[in-house]
Amino acid sequence: DQQVKQNSPSLSVQEGRISILNCDYTNSMFDYFLWYKKYPAEGPTFLISISSIKDKNEDGRFTVFLNKSAKHLSLHIVPSQPGDSAVYFCAASAEGTYKYIFGTGTRLKVLA
Amino acid sequence: NAGVTQTPKFRVLKTGQSMTLLCAQDMNHEYMYWYRQDPGMGLRLIHYSVGEGTTAKGEVPDGYNVSRLKKQNFLLGLESAAPSQTSVYFCASSPQGVEQYFGPGTRLTVT
């Protein structure tokens, strides 16, 4: 059973527009969420995180929103740039477990 | 500062052979992790360690063993490789068990 789901395998966006990547989870014990970005032939790199005590966290062009009642989080990238083209993974963890469950990823393509 | 390094980068094994993947980090991180990534499956946690001398099972530990004898190294062993273990393996480290820093990956093919 997939506890963390990214239902859109791919997304294409025009340069300068907003990219919205979505992630759903089923385990109500999850209380910390992260987004990673991955380029081909490289390891994932950390982007941004959010804890369950917040509903929003911003870092430059990246904003993560958390809706606990819907068990849903989203990553907004504004404005999108061609260099943002990559696979994005969300990951979730329950307090004290120190391990993360990853979603299957969404491939973002930003068109110039 | 090399971050997280993985050795080897590529390997081809025959069914039944054994091998060890080495992960090294120079950031003095307490936590280390081994993941595998398969098409359409995302990253799945194999084993992890919360400190030197400790190990714990993740989501998919069967067929793998690990050791963390030194803080900076985390070894992943395959005792008898199977074609189902064909995958890309990623190691990661973390200072506090939150954000993780990943290595470049090891592509393993078992024939």
Image (tube, coloured by chain):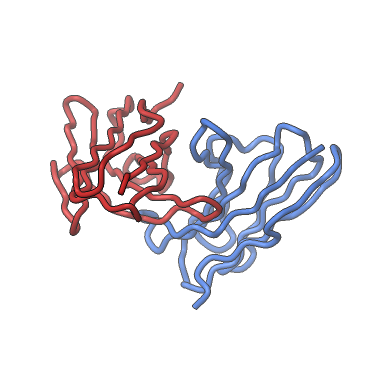
Chain colours: A red, B blue
Residue at screen point 66% across, 56% down: B67
Outermost residue toward the bottom in this view: B1
A48, A26: nearer the viewer = A48
The quadrant where residue B101 appears:
bottom left
A101, B106: nearer the viewer = B106
Residue at screen point 28% across, 44% down: A32
The quadrant where residue B110 appears:
top right
B98 displayed left or right of B25? left
B11 displayed left or right of A79? right
Q: Is residue A57 above or below residue B111?
A: below
Residue at screen point 69% across, 42% down: B64
B34, B67: nearer the viewer = B34
Residue at screen point 13% across, 41% down: A55
A108, B48: nearer the viewer = A108
Number of numbered labels in the structure image: 0
Counting from the top left corner in percent of width and height, residue A36 is at: 37, 49
Counting from the top left corner in percent of width and height, residue B1 is at: 49, 78
Counting from the top left corner in percent of width and height, residue A76 is at: 21, 43
B99 displayed left or right of A77? right
A14 displayed left or right of B101? left
Outermost residue toward the top in this view: A1
Counting from the top left corner in percent of width and height, residue B103 is at: 54, 59
